[in-house]
Image (cartoon, rainbow, N blue to C red):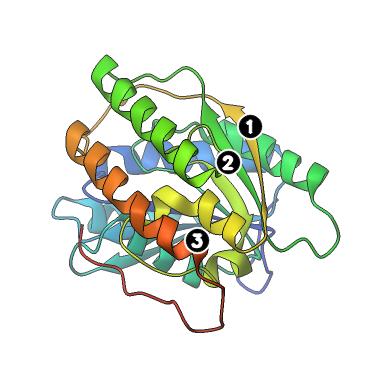
Amino acid sequence: MMVSETTVPELSVVVPVKDEAENLAPLIDEICTSLKDANVGFEIVYVDDGSTDATPALLADLMTARAELRAIRHRECQGQSAAIATGVEAARADLIATLDGDGQNDPADIPELLARYREVSAPGDKALMIAGHRTMRKDTWLRRLSSRIANGIRGVMLKDDTLDTGCGLKIFPREAFMAMPRFNHMHRFLPALMLRAGGRIECVHVNHRPRERGVSKYGVWNRLWVGIIDLFGVMWLARRPIHADSDTLEPNSR
């Protein structure tokens, strides 16, 4: 379903990227194909988080060929959480889908997550998240191990009803995200933050693919330890009552 500039889309797909020039066109093509086949009115919002490769120029070119695509650029790298927040803030739809820009998340799963959202949402439901669960990870054994350890510790400490919070594929209301506190690495804790707001989490099994192009921006052990350190901050935050405008934090650099 095509969406004109004056028509509000049903879904805004937010994709944060940094130095992913090789993955831009293939992933955008896949997103468009999967959502058009599912007859979903959509837009795609790419946020370039201070790329130093050809990403900015290629996004500019792709916007001339894809009416559904909008691109926003951070002049300097602000981190994945800040990039997602920028994309959600700029989104026109009430419903947001996120996925990683490295091509490992499969855009063909977005319609299934959307269908699940429609199935389980209730009238006026403003705090429901559908989270992808990668059951067959296409990563190195060391990366899978670090993720399993971090997910296990996080699950015990936060009880966030999510087996794979690191999966970039998620669908949630824009309004719910905009009400969340902002801090570095918040994207790793979106389910816990949704629960803090009185929301619900539903998990759907999704495909996971090996990285075919480009280079990963994350190390294994630094992701593990940063995630564990952040846990304590989120645990403290979860115990605080929610007051309007009382806990908005500025995102730090990556």
Position of residue 22 measured from the top left corner of the image (x, y, whole percent): 26, 38
Mark positioned earlier in the residue sequence (2 or 3): 2
Q: Nearer the viewer, mark 2 or mark 3?
A: 3
CB under 8 Å between callouts 2 and 1? yes
Amino acid carrying mark 2 in the image: Ala
* Identity of the residue furthest to the left in this view: 52
Disc 1 marks which residue?
Answer: 204
Give the mark count: 3
Nearest the eye: 31 or 244: 244
Residue at 50%, 63% (x, y): give it: 239
Marks 2 and 3 sit apart, C-alpha to C-alpha, by: 19 Å
Nearest the eye: 196 or 222: 196
Disc 3 marks which residue?
Answer: 238
Q: Is residue 113 left or right of residue 47?
A: right
Crowd around label 3: few <14 · some 14–19 · many ≥20 (10 Å): some
Marks 3 and 1 sit apart, C-alpha to C-alpha, by: 24 Å
Position of residue 139 measured from the top left corner of the image (x, y, whole percent): 32, 21
Amino acid carrying mark 1 in the image: Val
Q: Mark yes or no: residue 219 visible.
A: no
Query: What is the quadrant of residue 51 in the picture?
Result: bottom left
Q: Nearer the viewer, mark 3 or mark 1?
A: 3
CB under 8 Å between callouts 3 and 1? no
* Identity of the residue furthest to the right in this view: 123
Placement of 9 over or under 146, stated as above or below: below
Position of residue 62 measured from the top left corner of the image (x, y, whole percent): 38, 53
Mark positioned earlier in the residue sequence (2 or 1): 2
Disc 2 marks which residue?
Answer: 131
Amino acid carrying mark 3 in the image: Ala
Q: Quadrant of the C terminus?
A: bottom left
Nearest the eye: 58 or 73: 73
Q: Is residue 25 left or right of residue 173?
A: left
